[in-house]
Image (cartoon, helix red, strand yellow):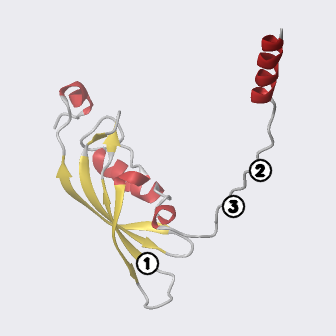
Amino acid sequence: MKRLGMVYICFLLLFLPIQNHVYSKEPKLNVDSLELQVQDTDPVSDAVKKYYAKSLKKVPVVYPYEMSVLHIERMDGFRSFRFKVFLDVVPVIGPHISVGRDRVTLLVTAGETKVISFEHIETFELPPKWAQFKKEE
């Protein structure tokens, strides 16, 4: 009987709600980063969609982690708010199958982001199962 009582007490002690005071830092939402700066991928996606519409039946997707910032320059000198951003982009279809590599140049101002130039660098061959999405030339 003593053993059963001890087991019961140990069981209660193990599963009693214990107050743990865990504190975490609040995230700094006002800190800017390169990742946040290129999250607006709509102009890039539109340029990619326009280019690959000629060769693919399925529209490729551009994910932020498939973009590399090559270079950023200020257009009007120090402390200006017009930027020229050079990106290396790898659009994908389906289960992240890369279809090519492109270089996109963006003009970023306070109110808008627009594509200045789009240069296709390399085309990747699609796997046999995905060849059906390639348009006949």
Residue 27 visible in this rendered orientation of the protein: yes
Q: Are marks 1 and 3 in contact (CB under 8 Å)?
A: no
| Quadrant of the frame with the C terminus | top left
Check disc 2: other Cα within 10 Å, few if <14, some if 14-19, many if 20+. few
Above or below, comparing residue 46 to residue 114 in the picture: above
Q: Which of these two is toward me, 116 or 12?
A: 12
76 over 95 or under it: above or below: below
Q: Can you tell which of label 2 and label 1 is closer to the viewer? A: 2
Q: Is residue 32 left or right of residue 84?
A: right
Q: CA distance from mark 2 to mark 1?
A: 46 Å
Q: Residue at x 20, y 31 (%)?
A: 127
Image location of residue 88, percent across then percent down: 30, 61
Label 1: element kind = strand
Residue 19 falls left or right of residue 99: right
Q: Which residue is mark 1?
A: 83
Residue located 22% across and 35% down the image? 135
Estimate the x, y position of residue 5 in percent, counting from the top left.
83, 15
User: Quick one: label 3, few (<14), some, or many (20+) residues within 10 Å?
Assistant: few
Q: Closer to us: mark 3 or mark 2? A: 2
Q: Is residue 136 above or below residue 70?
A: above
Q: Earlier in the sequence, mark 2 or mark 1?
A: 2
Let me know if residue 45 appears in the view.
no
Residue receiving disc 3: 26
Q: Which amino acid type is shown beneath numbered disc 1?
A: Phe
Query: Mark 3 and mark 2: span between their CA atoms?
Result: 15 Å
Q: Which residue is mark 2?
A: 21
